[in-house]
Amino acid sequence: MTTHRRNALVLIAATAVAVLSVAGCSTASPGGTGSSVGRASGSASSDGPTGKITVFAAASLQQTFTTLGKRYEDAHPGTTITFSFAGSSDLVTQIQNGAPADVFASADEANMAKLGATDLAAGSPRDFATNVLEIAVAPGNPKGIRDLDDLTSSGVQVVTCAAPVPCGAATAKVEQATGTDLHPVSEEQSVTDVLGKVESGQADAGLVYVTDVEGADGKVDGVPFAASAKAVNTYPIGVLRDAANPALATAFTAYVRSDAGEKVLADAGFGAP
């Protein structure tokens, strides 16, 4: 074989190898990209369930749950948590009437039990916090209120929660335990409504939770009273039977009860369950 012919064959072989290499790279590239996307998707999903849930929560949980929801979404991309805050008794009525919800967090065990009695709760709810009453007054306490008895004075306009609402039930327990007979100028359907009446000056005082005073940012002052220990409210949380996304609902309830959730709740003034 001549040198010229041998060199030509070598050149042809090298060219073929180069073409095959380029072809191989071109073929692998889409496959590689697909694998990379698959791994990224797998990584995101392995961090926990994704999707959306709606959480029905007691009005007194608005600040803490809003914080917890945002932190959970930030830590788990692909999740959206929507809240509906109101008096626990109103939320139970809404759920019983078919309102779509995945999770219910109540300000007392009695309202959670109503859902259990009608088989609307999935599994057993778990307690995650406690709360006690405190007297909310205008900044500086112009009426000089020092104890529960001061709320019975004729010159003091008092607002309380209605009896079916957890803060209303707690108020009734405190009245019974102390022999106090309050005569509120109005009874509200949520503790935030009571707080709003005091903040706006429509009432001189209101019975709310310690956490509501803490979260009022100085718009009210709080007057603690010893008898509040007679009515400690325990807060349970649970997944609802008809939850559209039970996996995410379960994950979020676990987060509320985690060390991170407990810290947010404790910082707001809630007690341990």
Image (cartoon, rainbow, N blue to C red):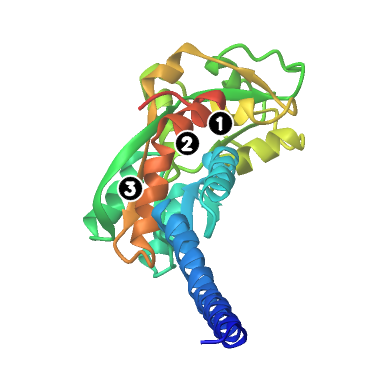
Q: Residue at x 58, y 88 (%)?
A: 5
Please name the residue that numbered disc 3 is placed on.
112
Q: Quadrant of residue 18?
A: bottom right
Of labels 2 and 3, earlier in sequence is 3
Q: Nearer the viewer, residue 107 or 240?
A: 240
- The reply to whether residue 263 is visible in this rendering is yes
Determine whether 112 is above or below 224 in the image: below
Nearer-the-camera pick, 12 or 190: 12
Q: Quadrant of the C terminus?
A: top left
Under circle 1, the secondary element is: strand
Q: Are marks 1 and 2 in contact (CB under 8 Å)?
A: yes
Kindly identify the amino acid type of the residue bearing the numbered disc 3: Met
Residue linked to disc 2: 167
**Residue at the (33%, 36%) spot, across then down:** 127
Residue ID at (63%, 20%): 222
The image quarter in which residue 152 lies? top right
SS class of the residue under badge 2? helix
Horizontally, is 183 left or right of 249 in the view? right
Q: CA distance from mark 3 to mark 1?
A: 20 Å
Residue matched to label 1:
208
